[in-house]
Amino acid sequence: MISIVIVSKDEEALDQTLADVAAQVDGLAGESEIVVVDASDGRLDHIRRRHEAAVRWVPFQRPPGVRVSIAHQRNAGVREARGEIIVFTDAGCRPRPGWLASLVAPLQQDERMTSGVTLATSGNGLYDPPERQAEEPTYLPECPTLNVAFRREVFDAVGGFDERFAYGSDVDFCWRLGDAGYCIRSVPGAVIEHDYGTWRRQLRRSYTYGKARARLYRKHRARLRHILRTDPMVVVYPLFLLGLPLTLIFPLYPALLLIPAWRNRSYGAGRVLVDHLTFGAGVLVELART
């Protein structure tokens, strides 16, 4: 059995996501279910009623003292799910035709976790990967949870998502899976589109992710040995920001940004640099806090 779990809070876009996912479930062989873990306190009841024939709705109460409960909701979703295969996507995601069948197919053979491709609905996302069909299986060190599937045994092996993380629990989950010997199979044919919102929202997201990244390395200290090779953004941009006063002595210091600007020119050099610097500021703020 396959369980598609969607966590939500006050997102009207959930309506279209449920319609799209339900259409793909209808084309699957075997049993399946859609589970929504909703922290909206009844504000999305109009959507619940519209999809109540096809969706199992799980009201979620945020734990006291918790502002962001994404990890809690994901754990609750897996506990409520009846399937051996768990699929995660998010409210606002629009799966392309064949997404669900492609994502779960390797799990019905010998894989334990899969990750699809996520593209911005605008067609011009900051980090949109190239769309391609891999001839050979490729594996990922980490992935976000808005387009993943895994066998329940994987979730149980690492104890689910760490609820101490407001953000970054998906990366922590992946890192712990890797440490436990599991692999994440990339499935380029499982494509969803996601509306990442305004540019201001993207910058807030980058700042938050920077803070989360610092917390991740505090927990996974052994990974610091390889951070310059595997995750240079966490080091390079915070150091650049700390060095900005050097501009008073070396006016050409900001020209160091020309290197990443050139490397990211296909995505829009200016917006990539602003995004990365905002990420670096988040890292610094979290380090200063601790």
Image (cartoon, rainbow, N blue to C red):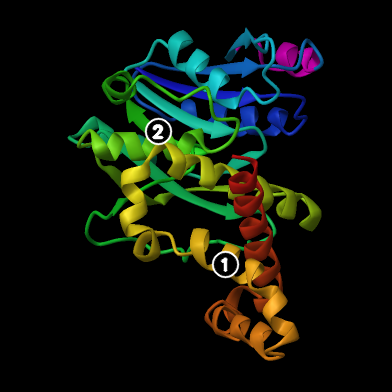
Q: Relative to 18, does residue 50 appear above or below in the rendering? A: above
Q: Quadrant of residue 158?
A: top left
In the shown orientation, is residue 174 left or right of residue 257? left
Query: In the picture shown, does residue 41 fall above or below 288?
Result: above
Q: Quadrant of residue 231?
A: bottom left
Chief secondary structure of the magenta span?
helix
Asked if one can make out residue 285 in the rendered structure from this viewpoint, the answer is yes
Residue 284 x %, y % = 62, 53
Mark earlier in primary sequence (2, 1): 2
Q: Mark 1 sits on what residue?
A: 239
Q: Residue at x 46, y 63 (%)?
A: 131
Asked if residue 68 is positioned above or below residue 249 in the image, the reply reads above
- With 174 as the anchor, is 157 left or right in this view? left
Look at the image and tell me in which quarter the N terminus lies. top left
How packed mark 1 is, by other alpha carbons closer than 10 Å (few <14, some 14-19, many 20 or more), is: some
Q: Amino acid at mark 2?
A: Phe
Which residue matches tag 2?
173
Dot 1 lies on which element? helix
Q: Quadrant of residue 171?
A: top left
Tell me the CA gap for discs 2 and 1: 27 Å
| Element under disc 2 | helix
- Front-most of 21 and 205? 205
Q: Read off the magenta span.
A: 44-53
Is residue 50 within the magenta segment?
A: yes
Q: Quadrant of the C terminus?
A: top right
Residue found 54% across the figure and 16% down from its top: 35
Whether residue 100 can be seen here: no
